[in-house]
Image (spheres, grey):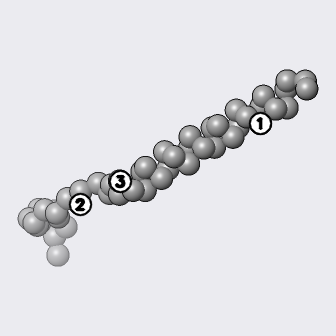
Amino acid sequence: MNDNVIKFQKRKAVKPPRQTPPWLRRLMIIGGVAIAIGLIYTYFALTIPA
């Protein structure tokens, strides 16, 4: 069979990008802020002489 033939096919449906749910996004932000505060506290607790 000849391989030099254009085959017309339907376009596949484009999937919308996956989005994180609002509660998970909020949880990640709160977790990131908590980790940042913990790191800042640890830094100052270890570097400032008591």
Label 1 amino acid?
Thr
The dot on residue 29 is none
Q: Residue furthest right?
A: 50
Residue 47 spot, x, y in % from top left: 85, 26
Residue 14 spot, x, y in % from top left: 20, 59
Label 2 amino acid?
Lys
Q: Does residue 4 sit above or below 29 in this rendering?
A: below
Quarter containing the N terminus: bottom left
Location of mark 2 (residue): 15
**16 and 37: which one is in front?**
37
Of the two numbered discs 2 and 3 on the same chain, state the one appearing first in sequence: 2
The residues tagged by marks 2 and 3 sit, at their Cα atoms, a distance apart of: 20 Å
Label 3 amino acid?
Pro
Residue drawn at x 77%, y 36% is 42
Residue drawn at x 35%, y 57% is 21
The residues tagged by marks 1 and 3 sit, at their Cα atoms, a distance apart of: 30 Å
Location of mark 3 (residue): 22
Q: How many marks?
A: 3
- Is label 1 in a helix, a strand or a loop? helix
Q: Residue furthest bottom?
A: 1
- Is label 3 in a helix, a strand or a loop? helix
Location of mark 1 (residue): 42
